[in-house]
Amino acid sequence: MTPTEQEAWFAEELLRWNQKLALVSKRWGLREVQEKIHQAHEVLPHLPPGILIDMGSGQGLPALIWALHREGQVTLLDLNAKKVAFLKHVIRQLGLTHVRALRANLNHPPVELLGSAAAVTAQAVDTLAQLDAWAQPLLQPGGVLIALKAKGGRLNEEMAEREAAGRNPEWIERAEGRGLVRLIGPIR
């Protein structure tokens, strides 16, 4: 299958599994999943080469889409066993030998991941300060935390807090108020 065919299969499979596992909103249809896939493509140019660890991977969006279009090991972390089972199913079915899904508590990441990541990513997971704390042990020197966020809410405050902590967050606009925050690290 081409990456486009893999994306189409993933979208259908996500909706099929969603009927029983509530991986995304029950109101989501193919259009919403395709929009999330499109949004994942917006981030691809901002991902550095090398090992990528996605925190709170949930149903695999956007990290599984990134894995279809990049080389390098991709590790998906989630605490929910049902979501990890879905991720493992998709990885197997698509033959993604460079991708793995692990059930993990972000407060106690698997030892083999420590200091390994060129990039740690997260979407819709906690505050920047907490994401930064979880990402630090996972990042290799010069690695980057990429947090997908929407403008508004507490984002400006969170970025100011990270700046006050010496982290110098960078906002990168994507589209329609969506963007990503880059934090270079780790702090050692």
Image: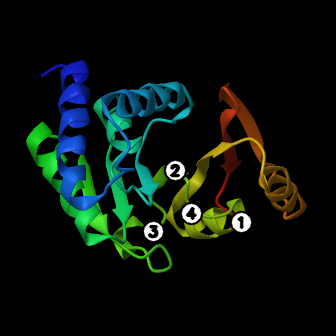
For marks 3 and 2, the one nearer the N-term is: 3
Labels 3, 1: front one: 1
Cα separation between marks 2 and 1: 14 Å
x%, y% of residue 159? Answer: 81, 53
Cα separation between marks 2 and 4: 8 Å
Cα separation between marks 3 and 1: 19 Å
Give the total of numbered labels: 4
Labels 3, 4: front one: 4
The residue where tag 3 is placed is 114
Could you say which quadrant of the image residue 75 lies in?
bottom left
The residue where tag 4 is placed is 135
Badge 4 element = helix
Cα separation between marks 3 and 4: 9 Å
For marks 2 and 1, the one nearer the N-term is: 2
Front in this rendered view, residue 46 or 103:
103
The structure residue drawn at horizontal position 54% and vertical position 69%, both measured from the top left corner, is 137
Front in this rendered view, residue 32 or 178:
32
The residue where tag 1 is placed is 129
Front in this rendered view, residue 156 or 53:
156
For marks 4 and 1, the one nearer the N-term is: 1
The structure residue drawn at horizontal position 57% and vertical position 69%, both measured from the top left corner, is 134
The residue where tag 2 is placed is 121
Q: Kindly identify which numbered label has been placed on residue 22.
A: none
Labels 3, 2: front one: 2
Cα separation between marks 4 and 1: 10 Å
x%, y% of residue 146? Answer: 59, 46
For marks 3 and 1, the one nearer the N-term is: 3
Amino acid type at mark 2: Thr
For marks 2 and 4, the one nearer the N-term is: 2
For marks 3 and 4, the one nearer the N-term is: 3
The structure residue drawn at horizontal position 37% and vertical position 51%, both measured from the top left corner, is 24
